[in-house]
Image (cartoon, helix red, strand yellow):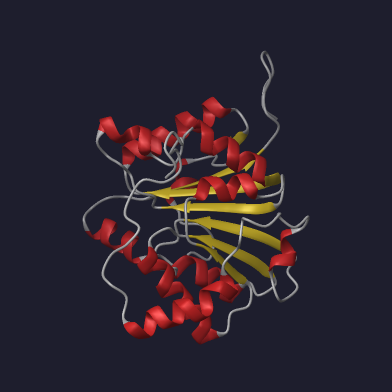
Amino acid sequence: MVRGERRDSFFGRRKGKRLTAARQALMEECLPELAVDIARPAPEHLAALFAVPVVEVRLEIGFGGGEHLLHRARQNPDIGFIGIEPFQNGLAKAVAAIEAEGLENVRLYGADAGPFLDWLPEGSLAGIDLLYPDPWPKKRHFKRRFVNQANLARLWRALEPGGHFRFATDIASYADWTMVEAAKHGGFAFLAERAQDWRRPFPDWPGTRYEAKAIGEGRRPVYFTFEKCRRASRGDKLR
């Protein structure tokens, strides 16, 4: 991180166990083909990033081992998926699966989400998923949570009108935090009408290993869907 740079989109590990020689070789050979290079100007339409025709593009921030990202890509070959994961071991796992399965509708970015979101054209994404982000459960660390006003502004700018921001967590304080931050931002409509709406997983939800562990330990996940809407001005109400 450059000295004096504000760090508001990623805190956490970037490396874990050393990669095997085979996986390191795969990263060196395949990642350059899959990686989105934000040093270059963003294309007018993100579909240009993909080797196959796609009708829309969706983003997952912090995809971990890639279970959800790859499931969505397999189920929706006509949609382009971009996955962000700074943790190199998770990135390597996704690269290996994409190469083995020949998935052509996935691109990856292996660094901080903030600059990537700033690089995206305005209104270029149909949806953004943030699933089980690091909860930073201690109160003194709440400021490190990804959901904050700076990042919500980035998400709102990148989403097309009516685009969805989906958020899942098993930490009650982070669920409450996210509702408060989204309301404070003023540009996201919470789509749940009853408690069952946010207790039920998203449609065609594959589950994740982290989620299974959380449920096994007695924590109940929540699944929030927000829709991008017009920012409210003073004295105005969101539609």
* Quadrant into which the N terminus falls: top left
Image x and y of residue 132, in percent: 39, 52
Q: Is residue 142 visible?
A: yes
Q: Is residue 190 visible?
A: no
Relative horizontal placement of residue 144, taking residue 79 as reference (left or right) = left
Say which of 66 and 208 sits in front. Answer: 66
Image x and y of residue 10, in percent: 41, 46
Residue farthest to the left, as pictured? 217
Say which of 78 and 151 sits in front. Answer: 151
Residue in view at x 40 percent, y 74 percent? 93
Relative horizontal placement of residue 56, taking residue 6 as reference (left or right) = right
Image x and y of residue 184, in percent: 53, 25
Image x and y of residue 230, in percent: 71, 32
Q: Is residue 3 above or below residue 19?
A: above
Say which of 238 and 118 sits in front. Answer: 118
* Quadrant into which the C terminus falls: top right
Residue farthest to the front, as pictured? 3
Relative horizontal placement of residue 145, taking residue 138 as reference (left or right) = right
Residue in view at x 63 percent, y 73 percent? 105
Residue in view at x 23 percent, y 53 percent? 218
Q: Is residue 33 above or below residue 38?
A: below
Q: Is residue 234 above or below residue 220?
A: above
